Image (tube, rainbow, N blue to C red):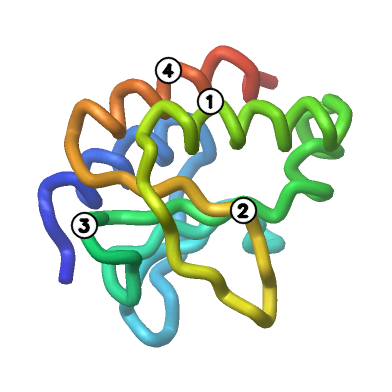
Amino acid sequence: MENAVYDNALTALKNLFGTPRPLVNKNGARFLRNGTITIYHTELAPGNEAEIAFNVQPIAALYHIPSATLSSLLDECRYLTGKPTETNKAQNWPRIGLATEEDVARVMEKLSAVLVK
């Protein structure tokens, strides 16, 4: 179910990545044409209000950074929030769990410092 943390994260992601497309099953939204970043508001780990999943290879290529650099950035973001996440076994993209609006602010600050065009 959509909530304030999800809405706040969605707005911040729009500022970084443009307009998303809603997912067909209505449990989130997908950014970038090839669907490389997805934010979810349902089917989350307990305690999370939103989770953001990243397809590392295409994002790293798009922003001209090594995949290892992006993976390290996502690890830092996960450490900042300290939240476990669900795993989509089909995609197995790294996810960041968000439980509070403070989590959103800290993660977006980190992401926006590196993911700039």
Can you tell which of label 4 and label 3 is closer to the viewer? 3
Q: In the picture, which quadrant includes the N terminus?
A: bottom left
Relative height, residue 66 to residue 55 (above, below): above
State if disc 4 and disc 1 touch (CB < 8 Å): yes
Sequence-wise first label, 4 or 3: 3
The residue carrying mark 3 is 47
Mark 4 surroundings: few (<14), some (14-19) or many (≥20) residues within 10 A? few
The residue carrying mark 4 is 109
Sequence-wise first label, 1 or 2: 2
Relative height, residue 40 to residue 26 (above, below): above
The residue carrying mark 1 is 111
State if disc 2 and disc 1 touch (CB < 8 Å): no
**Left or right for 56, reference 14:** right
**Left or right for 30, reference 80:** right
Report, in whole angstroms, how far the alpha carbon at label 1 lies from the one at label 2.
14 Å
Report, in whole angstroms, how far the alpha carbon at label 4 lies from the one at label 3.
22 Å
Image spot of residue 107 (x, y percent): 41, 28
Can you tell which of label 1 and label 2 is closer to the viewer? 2
Which numbered disc covers residue 19? none
Which numbered disc covers residue 94? 2
The residue tagged with tag 1: helix, strand or loop? helix
Q: Nearer the viewer, residue 30 or 57?
A: 57
The three-letter code of the residue at mark 2 reads Pro
Report, in whole angstroms, how far the alpha carbon at label 1 lies from the one at label 4.
6 Å
Q: Residue at x 21, y 26 (%)?
A: 102
The residue tagged with tag 2: helix, strand or loop? loop
The three-letter code of the residue at mark 3 reads Gly
**Left or right for 82, reference 42:** right
